[in-house]
Amino acid sequence: MPRIKHLGRVDYGATLAAMQEFTAARGPDTEDEIWLLEHPPVFTLGLNTAPEHLLAPGDIPVIQTDRGGQVTYHGPGQLVAYTLVDIRRAGLNVRELVCALERAVIALLADYAITAAGRRDAPGVYVAGAKIASLGLRIRKGSSYHGLALNVAMDLEPFSRINPCGFADLPVTQLKDQGGPGDLQKIAGALEPRLLSELRL
């Protein structure tokens, strides 16, 4: 069983550094960890971000990060799950890891009678074509960090300042607006067993 950490609202830059340090220091017997948290408002740029996808950040900080993917937004009311997992030990390749994270969110949403799906061409989870969860990962020494971000009950306006995940005019939605609960702690508790099951942990 991995260690599950509920970290509350934490700074993005400090959390990124902590993930990098954890991954660099881990050995073959290091216990996996899942960090459940939320961030203050921040735009993060994946390694593949094209500058034109950051439209008008305004007063929200912009941080270059080392995950894959494009630009996204994190803010209060969004549940972030960082999966620090030895994927070789779990028997997962990168594509299987992405699909496992998507399935965990899809199963969670199904509990609230929300039909969702992944997209092969654009990782993440979608409800009626609108993105409700984003994925971004980095693999180092056979272990993953970063993870997924599920919109629960947040201000979605900052998504209009970017092309989310590199797609212009991509609609964005959240759990509360789809008829689900807006309680972040409740959703974190519900997502936990789904992650453990899908990640084979």
Image: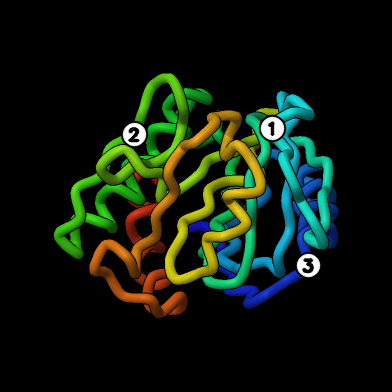
Residue at 84 percent across and 62 percent down: it is 14
Residue hosting label 1: 53
Q: Which of the two discs, 3 and 2, labels the residue nearer the N terminus? A: 3
Q: Residues within 10 Å of mark 2 (few under 14, many from 20)?
A: many
Expressed as whole percent of the image width and height from the top left, the position of residue 17 reads: 85, 53
Q: Locate residue 10 relative to residue 134 in the image: left or right.
A: right
Q: Is residue 93 above or below residue 5?
A: above
Residue hosting label 3: 11
Label 3 and label 1: CA atoms lie apart by: 23 Å
Asked if residue 46 shows in the view, the reply is yes
Q: Is residue 136 above or below residue 51?
A: below
Dot in front, 2 or 1: 1
Toward which corner of the image does residue 191 lie, by quadrant? bottom left
Q: Amino acid at mark 2?
A: Gly
Q: Which of the two discs, 2 and 1, labels the residue nearer the N terminus? A: 1
Q: Residues within 10 Å of mark 3 (few under 14, many from 20)?
A: some
Residue hosting label 2: 118
Q: Amino acid at mark 3?
A: Asp
Dot in front, 3 or 1: 1
- Mark 3: which secondary structure? loop
Expressed as whole percent of the image width and height from the top left, the position of residue 71 reads: 67, 38
